[in-house]
Image (tube, rainbow, N blue to C red):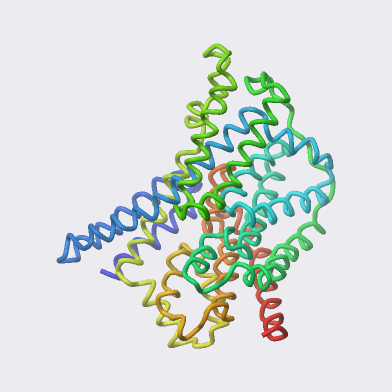
Amino acid sequence: MEWSLILVFILGFIAIALEHPLKIDKAATALLTAVLCWTIYMVSEADKEGVAHHLTMHMGEISEILFFLLGAMVIVELIDAHDGFEVVSEYVRTTDKKRLLWVVSSIAFFMSAALDNLTTTIVVVSLLRKLIDRREDRLLFAGLTVVAANAGGAWSPMGDVTTTMLWIGGQVTAINIIKMLFLPSLVCLAVPLLIRSRQMVGRITPPTRESDASADTSPTERRVVFFFGLGMLLFVPIFKTLTHLPPFMGMLFGLGVMWIVTELMHSGKDEVEKGPLSVVHALRKIDTPSILFFLGILVAVAALQSVGMLATLAAWLERTVGNITAICLIIGLLSAVVDNVPLVAAAQGMYPLELYPTDHYFWEFLAYCAGTGGSALIIGSAAGVAAMGMEKIDFVWYLKRITLWAVIGYLSGAAVYVAQSMLLH
């Protein structure tokens, strides 16, 4: 059974990578891979109810991520429909490619720590559409936004789901993880930016403003929707802290509030005028295939986790590698291929707090590696999947243009963390 699962997963992964040559949408491949993996698991097991229980349990966890993504995408789409990103683009006046790259990446880095890498990528990629017209330039900026968002999310307990898992599990504390991972994460972003910005010359061409329904919004409406929408996104971690409910509940709360606010704002307009500015219209415009692709990937990985293959992999690493620094680096690079959540969950199960207590070197370095290693591939993180769906970034294009610099940044930040730990611990 195990080898059949591995074969199906690898073939699915190859088909996703070759989406454009095969002319098959990656969402269809991901969904088919997921169903086949679980079918093999179900057919091979005598305990059918046990397999069904595993699937139900994983779907509960996966649905939290999908509803979070859905809510964030609708809020961002609503802001975009009201031309809310003009509020930011008005202040980003530079057209110099090199300077704009540093400005946008800095916004993504710090915003990711306050929100999370997924929401930040959705917001920043939407902003890039308002700033850059040429597709090739916009794809490069979007690719480096993924690196920036993942780096920014790693050093904050709210910025990346794996750091949040370690924080909730008691492996790290909020203040310490910020103190220990800020500099390595900053280096993880700065090194690729320094390399890429030296190769960039010229100026970007802003897109021509189209005359559409969004142009009918007043400056006041744009600002209200932008700041209210951004406020709802920022409120998600606060909501989680206050209520102890999962983050997707805070996102759905924010979506509900935004729905009411925009309905009241446009209550005096007729249906034709109000239609493109409504949440119902935003729901139709979001990239549903990307959500289905994300669903397929996570469900397929869940099958590998349920049969114990990821835990077996972690145990094999312990036996053959042994060194915890090397193990964390490998887990980080593996997270570019499979989801970092089950990898970190497996590590939490393998290593008790009695062996590695709270704020131990292993947990801190694991948070950095799992948070930033996914930047090596476009499908290696939630931020990458979001950018891939929004801008139709090709897997091979990202591999050629971004992967090398992302890996160099990843290793550079890792080296800084190891040196920093030797000095401080």
127 relative position to 97: left or right: left
Q: Residue at x 63, y 72 (%)?
A: 176
Residue 424, located in which quarter of the rendered image? Answer: bottom right
Q: Quadrant of the N terminus?
A: bottom left
Q: Residue at x 44, y 74 (%)?
A: 348
Q: Residue furthest left?
A: 46
Q: Residue at x 41, y 79 (%)?
A: 350
**What is the tally of numbered marks visible in this picture?**
0
Q: Is residue 341 above or below residue 297?
A: below
Q: Residue at x 71, y 62 (%)?
A: 189
The residue nearer to you, when weighing 149 against 265, is: 265
Residue 318, located in which quarter of the rendered image? Answer: bottom left
Across and down, in percent, residue 20 comes to 51, 46
Q: Residue furthest top?
A: 270
Q: Quadrant of the C terminus?
A: bottom right
193 relative position to 398: left or right: right
Across and down, in percent, residue 308 comes to 32, 72
Across and down, in percent, residue 288 comes to 46, 39
Across and down, in percent, residue 206 comes to 77, 35
